[in-house]
């Protein structure tokens, strides 16, 4: 499990608790802050999931990972070359 997954889950849980506390006390600011923290935790958890999936792909299919990296590099090069050619 990636550290971002763990951190994201902790932030999500803390945000849910803060949101609930704000709702319980009628404090709209605390409620909104908790909701924002909860969403930030979900985003960090999703990032951690993507990192773990990438790691697993590289470990189990290194040639596939190399191919994807080469294709991404080619497309990035074509994009940069196309942009610089259109300026000149």
Image (cartoon, rainbow, N blue to C red):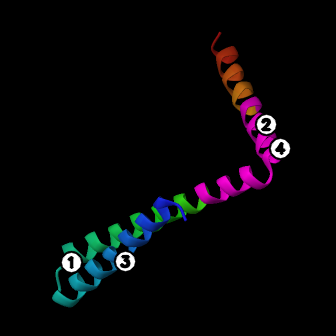
Q: Is residue 13 above or below residue 49?
A: below
Q: Nearer the viewer, mark 3 or mark 1?
A: 3
Residue 7, numbered label: none
Residue 72 place in picture, x, y as percent: 73, 37
Span of residues in magenta: 51-74
Q: Are marks 3 and 1 in contact (CB under 8 Å)?
A: no
Disc nearest the viewer among 4 and 1? 4
Q: Position of residue 70 (x, y in %)?
A: 77, 34
Q: Residues within 10 Å of mark 4 (few under 14, many from 20)?
A: few
Earlier residue among tags 3 and 1: 3
Residue that sits furthest to the front in the current view: 59
Q: Which of label 2 and label 4 is nearer to you?
A: 4
Q: CA distance from mark 2 to mark 4?
A: 12 Å
Tell me: 86 left or right of 47.
right
- Which residue, as the protein is rendered here, is positioned at the far bottom? 24
Residue matched to label 1: 28
Res. 23 image quadrant: bottom left
């Amino acid at each position: 499990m990636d550290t971002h997954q763990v951190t994201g889950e902790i932030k999500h849980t803390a945000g849910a608790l803060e949101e609930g506390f704000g709702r319980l006390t009628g404090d709209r600011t605390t409620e909104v802050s908790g909701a924002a923290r909860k969403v930030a935790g979900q985003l960090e958890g999703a990032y951690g999931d993507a990192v773990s999936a990438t790691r697993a792909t590289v470990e189990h299919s290194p040639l596939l990972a190399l191919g994807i990296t080469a294709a991404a590099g080619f497309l990035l090069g074509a994009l940069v070359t196309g942009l610089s050619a259109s300026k000149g």
